[in-house]
C-alpha cells in the first residue's frame, strides 16, 4: 500500500498525552497550570446529579450552550465558535484563514501548539523574544509582520512569565496588523485571574479575535472546551472547519453547571490569588527572584542556572511535588509554578525552601 502522506507532518513529533498515575496520585501537581486543589465533594455531587440528567444517548444539542457561553462572555452567540480548548481554536483559525506559505508571529517561549499547528498547515512560525523586563519586544514584533503574515498571536498573559500587554498596546498592534491584512489573536486563557479582556475591541478592529478556554480559571482542562470569538461573518467561516459537533453533551453540561455556579469558580480564583501573594512574600524572605502571579495562575522563579533547576525539580519530585523546568533560553534558569490556595502553596514552599538551601541557592535557610 502506498499512502499519500501529508509532507507537512514529516517534521512534527507528537506523543500521547498523560500518564495514568496522575489520575490517582496524591502528589501536588504544580507543573501544568491546572486546578491544584480538588473540587469540594458537595460540588462534585451536584455536578454528578446534573450529568445524570443529561442525554449522552442523543447527539449534542449545542445552541443552548452557545447562548450560555455567549451570555457569560458578553458577546453575541454568532460571534463564538466552540472549540477543543484554545488548541482547537488555534487549529481552526489556521485551517480556515492561513494559506500554505503564509507565516504567523508569536512570542517565545509560549504554548507549544502554535509552531506545531503552523508546521502542520505548511505555515512559517516566526517567534519573537522578550526583553530584560520580561516584556514582548513590540518593535521587533511589528517589524516581523509582513504581507505574508496571516496571524499575530498574543498569549496575554504568557507562560512562563506573564509579559502582560495592556489594551492600549493590543489596539496598537491590531492597527499595525491591519496594514498588512493580518489578524491579531489575543489568547485569554488566563482571563479570570486578573487581566482585562480585549473582547470589546472587536467592534473597533475587524481583524481582532480572542480565544478562551475553561481549562484554567474554571479548572476544567479535562472537559476540553474553549472558544474563539471575533467578527460574526468571519467566525461563521472559521466554524466551517468544525467536525460533526463542536463538543460533547457531557462536556457542554459540565461547563454549563459551572457557569450557573460561577461562585464556585470565583471563590477558587480568589484562593489562588491569595496563595500566590503568600508565596511571593515567602520567596522574598529567602531571596528568590520571581515574576508573574498577577494576571495568570502561575509564577516564574529564577534559580540562576539550568543545573539549579534540574536539582530542585528532582528534589521536589522525590517529595511528590511537581513543578516545571526545562524552559528554553533565556528562561532556562528558572521554573514555573502553578498557583494554588494557601494550604498547597505552604506545602510547596516548605519543601522548596529546604531544597534551595540544600543546593546552595537561597540566601537564608
Image (tube, grey):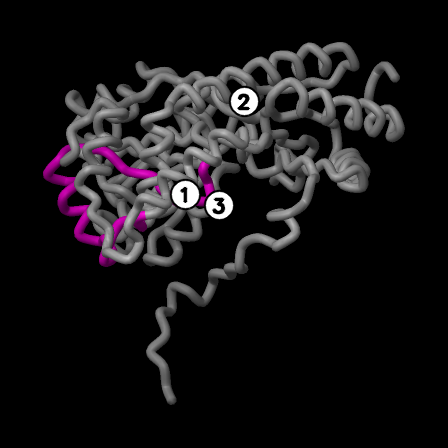
Disc 2 element: loop
Residue 83 vs 288, above or below: the answer is below
Q: Which mark is residue 112?
A: 3
Location of residue 7 (image quadrant):
bottom left
Is residue 226 a member of the stretch shown in magenta? yes
Disc 1 element: strand
Q: Earlier in the sequence, mark 3 or mark 1?
A: 3
Q: Is residue 137 visible?
A: no
In depth, the one of 227 and 126 nearer the eye is 227
Location of residue 74 (image quadrant):
top left
Check disc 2 and report the residue beneath it: 134
**What is the span of residues highlighted in magenta in the rendered image?**
220-249
Disc 3 from disc 1: Cα separation: 13 Å
In depth, the one of 300 and 171 nearer the eye is 300
Check disc 1 and report the residue beneath it: 126
Q: Badge 2: how crowded within 10 Å, few (<14), some, or many (20+)?
A: some
Amino acid at each position: 500500500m502506498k499512502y499519500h502522506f501529508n509532507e507537512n507532518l514529516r517534521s512534527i513529533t507528537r506523543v500521547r498525552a498523560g500518564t495514568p498515575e496522575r489520575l490517582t496520585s496524591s502528589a501536588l501537581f504544580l507543573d501544568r497550570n491546572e486546578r491544584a486543589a480538588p473540587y469540594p465533594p458537595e460540588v462534585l455531587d451536584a455536578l454528578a446529579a446534573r450529568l445524570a440528567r443529561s442525554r449522552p444517548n442523543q447527539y449534542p444539542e449545542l445552541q443552548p450552550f452557545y447562548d450560555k457561553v455567549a451570555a457569560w462572555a458578553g458577546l453575541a452567540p454568532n460571534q463564538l465558535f466552540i472549540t477543543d480548548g484554545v488548541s482547537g481554536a488555534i487549529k481552526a483559525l489556521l485551517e480556515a484563514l492561513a494559506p500554505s506559505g503564509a507565516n504567523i508571529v508569536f512570542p517565545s517561549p509560549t504554548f507549544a501548539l502554535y509552531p506545531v499547528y503552523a508546521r502542520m498547515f505548511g505555515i512559517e512560525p516566526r517567534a519573537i523574544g522578550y526583553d530584560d523586563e520580561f516584556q514582548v519586544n513590540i518593535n521587533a514584533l511589528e517589524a516581523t509582520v509582513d504581507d505574508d503574515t496571516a496571524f499575530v498571536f498574543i498569549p496575554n498573559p504568557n507562560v512562563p512569565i506573564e509579559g502582560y500587554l495592556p489594551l492600549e498596546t493590543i489596539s496598537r498592534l491590531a492597527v499595525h496588523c491591519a496594514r498588512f491584512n493580518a489578524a491579531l489573536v489575543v489568547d485569554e486563557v488566563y482571563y479570570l485571574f486578573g487581566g482585562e479582556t480585549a473582547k470589546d475591541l472587536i467592534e473597533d478592529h475587524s481583524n481582532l479575535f480572542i480565544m478562551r478556554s475553561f481549562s484554567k480559571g474554571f479548572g476544567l482542562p479535562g472537559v476540553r472546551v474553549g472558544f474563539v470569538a471575533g467578527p460574526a461573518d468571519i467566525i461563521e467561516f472559521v466554524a466551517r472547519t468544525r467536525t460533526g459537533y463542536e463538543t460533547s453533551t457531557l462536556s457542554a453540561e459540565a461547563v454549563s453547571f459551572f457557569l450557573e455556579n460561577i461562585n464556585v469558580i470565583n471563590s477558587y480564583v480568589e484562593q489562588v490569588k491569595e496563595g500566590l501573594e503568600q508565596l511571593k512574600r515567602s520567596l522574598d524572605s529567602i531571596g528568590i527572584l520571581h515574576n508573574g502571579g498577577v494576571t495568570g495562575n502561575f509564577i516564574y522563579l529564577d534559580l540562576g542556572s539550568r543545573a539549579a533547576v534540574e536539582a530542585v525539580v528532582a528534589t521536589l519530585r522525590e517529595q511528590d511535588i511537581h513543578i516545571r523546568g526545562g524552559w528554553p533560553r533565556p528562561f532556562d534558569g528558572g521554573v514555573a509554578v502553578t498557583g494554588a490556595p494557601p494550604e498547597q502553596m505552604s506545602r510547596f514552599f516548605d519543601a522548596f525552601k529546604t531544597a534551595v538551601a540544600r543546593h546552595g541557592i537561597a540566601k537564608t535557610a
